[in-house]
Image (cartoon, helix red, strand yellow):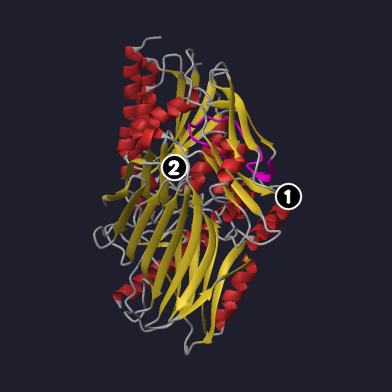
């Protein structure tokens, strides 16, 4: 009874707060366990992922089991993450012995069909994309004692960086701060997602199995996020198993598996898929290894603006990791470089109105600045305001400018950030570092994409030194410029991307497209190396065709890359005509290639009418907080909830900036101007 009164009081308080604020409250919250034991509060009973990697293509089956152990019929709602590069192309629902293959449909029609089935007492499942890396599953009319199994299938292409491949499977969506434009998403309801109290383990059984087979001998395989051992089954074959029976907290962070091939080789070359039916579409994917990086003797002076997220979700482990990262980055500053720092949470403060040289006076000024402002930080993750201020801050006119954004990305207004950075492109290169165990990679990658920079993700403090080194190497000089891909005797069409920008990162150049006719001829990549030399690499099509042309995943991957170019990071919202055309094209792609997109969803309906005497109660499955994320990322149950509720801990950023400026001072003393 007391719990019920507390819940009523909390709901009333939140409603009054929203009324006073003049807006509807949407934000994450901690799960309050229902006193009614007849209602199942945690309907996701099991989640099992089976990953098969062959060469550079990953095929994933994700099996989710929803069960109702309570006494009332329920509708289960579960928000879960996915990889930004994945192509979700299939879904099945199983209830009892009956399997229903889901259909792809326009988003609004799929939702209408789901609601109709729910009202007709039919069990149905609906999969919607809320972001390219966030999905929502609704399962209607799960009766007491029922188990409903939903099988999802997706494909992903893996690339190497510095000779290392990585497969990433996110397991939890971090709490999002919502304060962007209403046009940024079709619905922000998913942001109001429940989380378990810190220290509470999820009741969901979890199992992850990976089977890795490469075309070249393996040199090393590591799971950098979980302690499960790697089993080597051959020179080109390894496997991994992670499950909740041995690690109860394995679902609170990304699963990251990294591997290297012998002699640091890259599986460059071409994959072909020829349609089995006459008149069908053929697809190809080519990975071309770039030339070795050439370090110039004279590196131009740089101006750095570090834009640092110190909101509530960054407290603790993420901020400590960011501190170590920035210390390493600062250690690489030269006496000819200039720098500035902008801290943001609910508001923002800057170290200086203009870039500072690394003199002792400026360092002392920075320390005084931080001692004062670190006690005043409050509010949520106001990234847009911080970015606006950053791009308008003056830089050093005679230096190449780089804006370095450091954040966990826990916001739900990604498109606002992309548009802002894109509109300011040319003023500076924008790089983004994602910090934490389960960062919002869509935001981190999108900011870098829009800003012509590179995305970096740091999941542990130990990764900071190597990441800082890679960043420095990245910005010093491009690997390849003036890049062109030509075809000779090979009828290639509809290439993605449509053009290849300068190559900075030491990773293969990937192009995916369609082809017609006979699989013969050549693909020729040309460009200028960092040393100013002409570069040319030739890929022979016939050699690959002789080894086989059955790679059906390329069909979905091509469609996904086309969707990415059209909508993921594209500027659309301020151009109604272009937006309408893009929505239609993306919708058509989803329907044609059975692909989950922002405008197409999967719907499965069991046409059997169930014996239901009362409306199903909607239950949102609570997720664990990502590892290292502070409880301050989610509002306390004892205070009114604001959007996202990211409230920074006073003084939490002191150590971070003190370390930065102290190391800068040490650097200056070692290398006087």
Can you say whether 107 is above or below 661 in the image? below
Q: Quadrant of the N terminus?
A: bottom left
Q: Residue furthest left?
A: 246
In-image side of 190 versus 435 (left or right)? right
In this view, 15 is above or below 57: below
Q: Give the labeled residue for mark 1.
A: 578
User: Which quadrant holds residue 5?
Assistant: bottom left
Is residue 425 visible in the rendered image? The answer is: no
Span colored in magenta: 490-510
Furthest-front residue in this view? 546
Q: Residues within 10 Å of mark 1 (few under 14, many from 20)?
A: few
Is 640 located above or below residue 528 in the figure?
below
**For residue 580, side relative to residue 70 (left or right):** right
- Residue sitting at x 30%, y 57%: 242
Which numbered circle lies on residue 345?
Answer: 2
Counting residues from the start of the chain, the first of labels 2 and 1 encountered is: 2
Is residue 493 one of those drawn in magenta? yes
Residue 277 quadrant? bottom right
Magenta span dominant secondary structure = loop
């Amino acid at each position: 009874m007391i719990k019920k009164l507390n819940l009523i009081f909390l709901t009333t308080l939140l409603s009054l707060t929203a009324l006073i604020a003049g807006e509807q409250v949407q934000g994450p919250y901690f799960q309050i366990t229902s006193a009614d034991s007849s209602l199942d509060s945690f309907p996701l009973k099991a989640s099992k992922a089976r990953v098969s990697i062959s060469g550079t293509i990953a095929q994933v089956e994700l099996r989710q089991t929803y069960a109702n152990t309570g006494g009332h019929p329920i509708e289960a709602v579960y928000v879960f993450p996915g990889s930004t590069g994945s192509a979700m192309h299939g879904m099945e629902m199983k209830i009892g012995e009956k399997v229903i293959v889901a259909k792809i449909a326009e988003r609004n029609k799929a939702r209408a069909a789901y609601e109709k089935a729910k009202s007709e007492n039919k069990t149905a499942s609906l999969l919607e994309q809320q972001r390219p890396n966030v999905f929502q599953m609704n399962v209607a009319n799960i009766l007491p004692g029922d188990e409903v199994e939903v099988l999802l299938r997706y494909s992903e292409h893996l690339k190497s960086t510095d000779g290392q491949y990585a497969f990433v499977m996110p397991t939890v969506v971090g709490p999002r701060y919502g304060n962007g434009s209403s046009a940024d998403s079709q619905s922000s309801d998913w942001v109001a997602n429940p989380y378990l109290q810190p220290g509470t383990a999820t009741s969901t059984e979890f199992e992850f199995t990976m089977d890795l087979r490469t075309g070249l001998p393996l040199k090393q395989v590591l799971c950098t996020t979980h302690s499960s051992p790697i089993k080597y089954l051959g020179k080109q074959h390894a496997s991994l198993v992670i499950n909740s029976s041995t690690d109860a907290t394995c679902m609170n962070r990304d699963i990251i598996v990294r591997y290297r091939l012998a002699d640091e080789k890259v599986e460059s070359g071409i994959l072909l898929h020829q349609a089995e039916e006459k008149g069908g579409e053929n697809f190809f994917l080519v990975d071309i290894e770039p030339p070795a990086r050439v370090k110039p003797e004279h590196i131009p002076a740089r101006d750095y603006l570090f834009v640092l997220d110190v909101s509530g979700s960054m407290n603790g482990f993420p901020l400590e990791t960011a501190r170590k990262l920035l210390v390493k980055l600062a250690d690489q500053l030269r006496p000819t470089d200039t720098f500035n720092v902008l801290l943001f949470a609910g508001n923002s403060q800057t170290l200086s109105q203009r870039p500072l040289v690394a003199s002792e006076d400026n360092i002392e000024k920075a320390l005084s600045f931080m001692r004062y402002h670190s006690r005043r930080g409050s509010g949520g993750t106001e990234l847009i305001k911080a970015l606006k201020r950053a791009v308008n801050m003056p830089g050093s006119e005679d230096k190449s400018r780089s804006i370095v954004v450091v954040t966990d990305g826990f916001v739900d207004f990604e498109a606002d950030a992309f548009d802002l950075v894109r509109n300011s492109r040319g003023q500076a290169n924008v790089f983004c570092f994602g910090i934490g165990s389960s960062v919002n990679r869509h935001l981190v990658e999108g900011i870098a994409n829009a800003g012509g920079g590179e995305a970096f993700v740091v999941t542990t403090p130990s990764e900071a030194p190597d990441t800082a080194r890679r960043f420095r190497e990245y910005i010093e000089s491009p690997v390849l410029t003036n890049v062109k891909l030509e075809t000779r005797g090979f009828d290639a069409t509809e290439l993605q991307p449509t053009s290849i920008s300068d190559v900075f990162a030491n990773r293969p150049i990937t192009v995916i497209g369609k082809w017609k006719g006979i699989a013969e001829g050549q693909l020729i990549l040309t460009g200028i190396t960092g040393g100013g030399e002409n570069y040319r690499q030739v890929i022979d099509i016939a050699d690959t065709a002789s080894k086989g042309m059955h790679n059906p995943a390329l069909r979905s991957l091509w469609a996904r890359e086309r969707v990415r170019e059209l909508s993921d990071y594209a500027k659309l919202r301020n151009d109604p005509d272009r937006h309408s055309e893009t929505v239609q094209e993306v919708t058509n792609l989803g329907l044609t290639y059975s692909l989950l997109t922002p405008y197409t969803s999967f719907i499965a309906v069991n046409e059997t009418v169930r014996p239901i005497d009362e409306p199903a109660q909607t239950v949102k499955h609570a997720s664990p907080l990502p590892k290292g994320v502070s409880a301050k990322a989610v509002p306390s149950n004892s205070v009114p909830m604001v959007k996202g509720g990211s409230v920074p801990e006073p003084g939490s950023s002191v150590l971070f900036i003190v370390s930065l400026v102290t190391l800068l001072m040490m650097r200056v003393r070692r290398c006087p101007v």
